[in-house]
Amino acid sequence: MPVKKSLLFLLLLLLTWPGWALADTDLAAARKFNEGCLRCHGAQGLHTRSNGQKISLYVDESKYFSSIHGTNRCTTCHTDITDYPHVGAKTGAELRRLVESNCRRCHDYITRVYDQSAHGLARRQGKPTALCQDCHGKHDIRKKEDPLAHTSGRNQTASCTASGCHSGRIKESYTESFHGKAVDLGGTKAATCSGCHGSHNILGPKDPASPVNKVNVPQTCAKCHFRAEPNFAKGTEHFLLEKEGPGSPMYYTLKFFVWLTISVMVLLTIHMELELYRKWKAAKGGGSYGSH
């Protein structure tokens, strides 16, 4: 039996070895090619200006080569760069669209799913919306399971609310919720943005196919909550603790416990002071504490 296990291990090693060797070769080739780019772009402080705004051109070499795209050449995404100096290099929104179109060359299926989403619809209509790099990052893209990834559970809130996309009440209400606090405290199973809304296939709540449509909410909640009942759909997410609205019961409950805590502490302090006064009076009068 040990011999068979050893032979099986050697067979698996031989089958996977070419993949390891190829990955190392690709990384070495990418490093060599990208050295020319990083001679300039590896310098902190390198920047340009576009429409009056200062734009950083710095690329952290260590982050890029440890990213999921670390084996890619810079020109895989920056297809408009063909010479030096970079005459006519795209910047701003134009560069965003170019890079996003290049993502489609490799990630065809995902982009077709994205095109059917609320973000994809906004893109087709020419409205401001989230593109690939807005959620996944640029030169430091990592797998979602990586804690450093922009799409990891703990970082999703920052990614989804960057550039004012879903900031304000949406961000505040999530970070103050049980889910948000659990994620902030390091929970890996608590609901994140994509856990409820989806990722590349995000749809509006009125869309029948949306996981946050009232009909689908129990099924969505059931991914974490065993036997989620239809009443789950009657609950309200993304509410703030305010005097009026869905957050009012929690608002007044919070206020009650705040004042209860203050009252207890005040009464306890008074009690302690009276107790100390009694001891002091007993000691001053020559009597014993507790005597009558």
Image: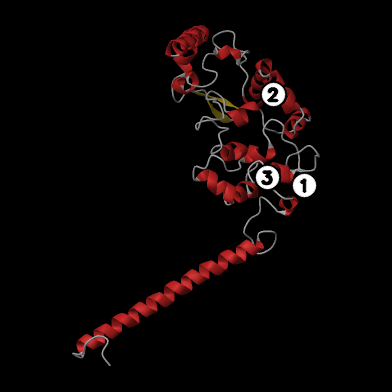
Foreground: 192 or 100?
192
Residue that extends furthest to the left in the rendered view of this protein: 286
Residue 185 marker: none
| Label 3 residue SS | helix
> What amino acid is at disc 2?
Ile
Earlier-in-chain disc, 2 versus 1: 2
Marks 1 and 3, how far apart at CA:
11 Å
Q: Is residue 259 visible?
A: yes
Q: Which of marks 1 and 3 is in front?
A: 3
Q: Please tell me how crowded label 3 is: few (under 14), some (14-19), or many (20+) other residues with Cα within 10 Å.
A: many
- Whether residues under marks 2 and 1 lie with C-beta atoms below 8 angstroms apart, the answer is no
Can you identify the residue that label 2 sits on?
110
- Could you tell me which quadrant the C terminus lies in? bottom left
Which quarter of the figure has residue 285?
A: bottom left
| Label 2 residue SS | helix
Expressed as whole percent of the image width and height from the top left, the position of residue 290 reads 27, 86
Can you identify the residue that label 1 sits on?
214
On screen, residue 28 versus residue 79, left or right, reads: left
Foreground: 44 or 103?
103
> What amino acid is at disc 3?
Cys
Name which residue lies at 48% across and 69% down.
Answer: 261
Marks 2 and 1, how far apart at CA:
26 Å
On screen, residue 244 versus residue 141, left or right, reads: right
Name which residue lies at 20% across and 88% down.
Answer: 284
